[in-house]
Image (cartoon, rainbow, N blue to C red):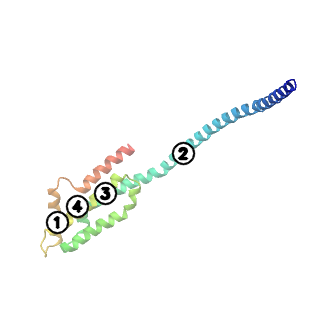
Amino acid sequence: MVGRLPLKIDIMEKSTDYILSILEVLKYIIPAGVVFGIVQYILKNFFDNEYQRRHIELKVETNKLITPLKLQAYERIVILMERMSPNNLIFRVSHPGISATQLKIALIQDINNEFNHNVSQQVYVSSQSWQMVRIAKEEMINIINTSYSSLGPNSVGLDLSKAIFENMMQKESIPTNLALEFIRKEFHLLFD
């Protein structure tokens, strides 16, 4: 039994040395881990704040560039609606001696040309505004076609013009005016 005692002491000394070695390593690792964690937290906050600051700066800079384009888009859409309104459209396109068929074709062609010329403005306005513009265009073409279908085969442009105005008087509101009203409200919500 005596021979075993030094072996136990020897094992205890070795395990004590092992524990002391681990404690010695831990006294460097724990403070280094704490410092690393603090530095990581500080750097993460710094970079997050820097990202947000730059994001806000970019938004402000973008708004400086986009706002004039948005204003111009709303102006152009208002002009488009005014040019598509029945009064302006007929007086601009119609001329003496034109047949009803020629006037119908010219009116629809003018509406489509005006619309296609301004189609890029949809990028700068809301989808609801652009939908109103599209609906106004389609309804105006529908009114022209409906008015034309009520005419006889030998009708002249003046007859078609009268039929269009009569058709418009039967409606509660003019499609282009509805679109204009919506666009103006949206404009004032955004820029007032």
Q: Callout 1: 10 Å neighbours few (<14), some, many (20+)?
A: many
Q: CA distance from mark 4 to mark 3?
A: 15 Å
Q: Is 16 positioned to the left or the right of 166 in the image?
A: right
Q: Of the residues shown, which amino acid type is indicated by label 3?
A: Val
Q: Nearer the viewer, mark 3 or mark 2?
A: 2
Q: CA distance from mark 1 to mark 2?
A: 54 Å
Q: Are marks 4 and 3 in contact (CB under 8 Å)?
A: no
Above or below for 181 versus 105? above
Q: CA distance from mark 2 to mark 4?
A: 46 Å
Above or below for 23 versus 160? above
The residue lying at 61 percent from left, 41 percent from top is 47
Secondary structure under tag 2 reads helix
Provide the residue designation for mark 1. 147
Provide the residue designation for mark 3. 133
Provide the residue designation for mark 4. 86
Q: Earlier in the sequence, mark 2 or mark 4?
A: 2
Q: CA distance from mark 3 to mark 2?
A: 33 Å
Secondary structure under tag 1 reads helix
Q: Of the residues shown, which amino acid type is indicated by label 4?
A: Pro
Q: Of the residues shown, which amino acid type is indicated by label 2?
A: His
Q: Are marks 1 and 3 in contact (CB under 8 Å)?
A: no
Q: Are marks 1 and 4 in contact (CB under 8 Å)?
A: no
Q: Earlier in the sequence, mark 1 or mark 4?
A: 4
Provide the residue designation for mark 2. 55
- Toward the front, the furthest residue is 1
Q: Nearer the viewer, mark 2 or mark 4?
A: 2
